Image (spheres, grey):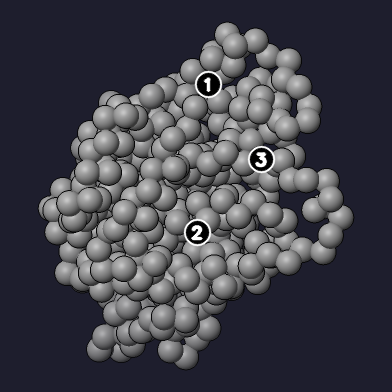
């Protein structure tokens, strides 16, 4: 007998539907699986067999053939266990339903029949709604995540027996649809949230003594989505200030939260019973991280750190210590806001719009330019150290800040700096000006301005244009640096509440490019 159910496989951050066709026929006992399954799916034969038997059900001693259609699409993941098990039971006569057209099933099985948490549930739920399926049968811990998609009935199950009961015949009529709430709840049932966007536990800028220029640079970066590089000796506070940047970023919008949640779902980073991610990500990989872990990839493409930082902050401490290959791999994502991973088996595109904050010492010993302690490095050593960052990579960084060491006396006094809440209020006000100006366009902040946006939003009067021309000639700015300088000046003007870019805004932007 033949049974057919619907499942799905995730490619990049999108999902494709898969028909799980199970045939149980007379013959020598065997279990064949076709349709380009990966190793995890092929191993499901042993999990499914044990789960059925340990659920006090009969595993058919016949010839079993499982086809995953379409046959030319590579399937990955362990979420095919549950549909395969239900298909075997249906084809062998233990279930009255043998063909379920409007139900999508996913879940990994334990040997005792328990249904384990799955990854990539959010894009699968989106695909189910796109194909007008009415119901999604999935593990209980993933119910809150799937419920973020409206117009889809979510049926959570904890065991194989519960799944069997769930697919039993029902009275005629559509199942009740569940609706999403922006707070991460489903009508009648709490969906929960991964994070509510609260930043009270993020370190506060008020604890940082001095460093007014660095705070100003990070405020500008948060306002316009610009990339920054902090250069200072050990102990100057590069890391502590970078970790405070999420505390001044505006909260995620609904679309941004869904994008972020989708990426974390595919990566398997959402906690059990987790819902919508409401806090902007902050990723800080170690400098020994490989280029695949940083950018993404693998034989079956998976998101890397830059995609996990989408809509948030990517902090690279000790930037020159990263491998040259890893740093150069950042160039295209920094420019385009996405990364495309191409492999022989398949290719995938991952979004990667983030604020890059790098931190580095001015030289190998870290003391070049220190007001008290002498530097032990030769000019050649300093040059080789800085040459680890290529010109094209630095060309994509808008703000380069010299962070001096804090005076010893300041460390003993009580902090009295501006709070993150006050800075965040200024950032949100400037972002609102950008949102009004960019209404109806694809850009979301000044760093994403297109060439057409530059012509309309970054017009200069004659004195300001002359200053820019002189600076471009003196600093030998590339065309890309010229464009990024205009975007930076536009952000500074937004913070100032100005309708157009003036000489003070451009002059302040220039100081962040005049670095040795």
Query: Which is more N-terminal, label 1 or label 2?
Result: 2
Report, in whole angstroms, how far the alpha carbon at label 2 lies from the one at label 1.
26 Å
- Residue 404's disc number: 3
Left or right position of 203 against 357? right
Q: Which residue is mark 1?
A: 386
Q: Nearer the viewer, residue 145 or 304?
A: 304
Residue 495's tag is: none
At 57% from the left and 50% from the top, the residue drawn is: 214
The residue that appears at 65% across and 61% down in the rendered structure is 205
Residue closer to the observer: 73 or 272: 272
Q: Nearer the viewer, mark 2 or mark 3?
A: 3
Q: Quadrant of the N terminus?
A: bottom left
For the question of whether residue 247 can be seen, the reply is yes
For marks 2 and 3, give the CA distance: 18 Å
Circle nearer the N terminus (3, 1)? 1
Mark on residue 219? 2
User: Which residue is rendered at x = 44% and y = 43% of the image?
Assistant: 511
- Residue 123, quarter of the rendered image: bottom left
Per the image, label 3 sits on a secondary structure element best described as loop
Rendered position, 458 above or below 363: below
């Amino acid at each position: 007998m033949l049974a057919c159910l619907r499942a799905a496989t995730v490619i990049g951050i999108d999902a494709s539907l898969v028909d799980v066709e199970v045939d149980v026929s007379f013959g020598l006992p065997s279990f064949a699986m076709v349709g380009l399954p990966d190793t995890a799916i092929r191993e499901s034969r042993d999990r499914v067999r044990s789960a059925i038997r340990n659920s006090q059900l009969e595993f058919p001693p016949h010839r079993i053939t499982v086809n995953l259609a379409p046959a030319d699409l590579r399937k990955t993941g362990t979420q095919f266990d549950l549909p395969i098990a239900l298909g075997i039971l249906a084809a062998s006569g233990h279930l009255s339903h043998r063909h379920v057209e409007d139900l999508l099933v996913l879940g990994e099985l334990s040997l005792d029949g328990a249904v384990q948490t799955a990854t990539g549930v959010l894009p699968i739920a989106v695909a189910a709604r796109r194909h007008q399926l009415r119901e999604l049968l999935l593990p209980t811990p993933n119910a809150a995540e799937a419920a973020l998609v409206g117009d889809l009935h979510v049926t959570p199950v904890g065991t194989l027996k519960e799944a069997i009961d769930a697919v039993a015949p029902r009275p005629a009529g559509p199942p009740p649809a569940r609706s999403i709430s922006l707070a991460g709840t489903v009508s009648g049932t709490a969906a929960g949230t991964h994070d509510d966007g609260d930043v009270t536990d993020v370190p506060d800028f008020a604890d940082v003594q001095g460093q007014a220029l660095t705070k100003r640079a990070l405020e500008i970066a948060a306002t316009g989505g610009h990339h920054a590089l902090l250069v200072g000796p050990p102990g100057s506070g590069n890391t502590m200030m970078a970790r405070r940047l999420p505390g001044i970023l505006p909260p995620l919008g609904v679309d941004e939260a869904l994008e972020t949640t989708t990426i974390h779902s595919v990566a398997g980073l959402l906690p059990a019973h987790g819902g919508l991610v409401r806090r902007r990500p902050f990723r800080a990989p170690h400098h020994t991280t490989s280029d695949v872990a940083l950018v993404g990839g693998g034989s079956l493409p998976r998101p890397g750190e830059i995609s996990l930082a989408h809509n948030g902050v990517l902090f690279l401490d000790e930037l020159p210590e990263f491998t040259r290959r890893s740093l150069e791999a950042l160039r295209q994502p920094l420019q385009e806001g996405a990364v495309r991973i191409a492999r022989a088996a398949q290719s995938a595109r991952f979004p990667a719009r983030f604020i890059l904050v790098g931190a580095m010492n001015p030289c190998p010993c870290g003391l070049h330019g220190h007001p008290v302690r002498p530097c032990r490095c030769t000019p050649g050593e300093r040059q080789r150290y800085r040459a680890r960052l290529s010109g094209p990579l630095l060309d994509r960084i808008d703000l380069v800040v010299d962070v001096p060491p804090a005076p010893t006396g300041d460390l003993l006094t009580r902090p009295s700096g501006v709070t993150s809440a006050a800075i965040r209020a200024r950032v949100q006000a400037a972002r609102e000006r950008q949102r009004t100006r960019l209404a109806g366009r694809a850009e979301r902040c000044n760093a994403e301005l297109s060439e057409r946006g530059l012509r309309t939003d970054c017009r200069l009067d004659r004195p300001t244009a002359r200053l820019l021309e002189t600076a471009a000639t003196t600093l030998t700015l590339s065309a890309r640096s010229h464009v990024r300088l205009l975007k930076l000046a536009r952000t500074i003007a937004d913070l100032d509440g100005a309708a157009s870019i003036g000489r003070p805004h451009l002059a302040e932007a220039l100081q962040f490019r005049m670095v040795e």
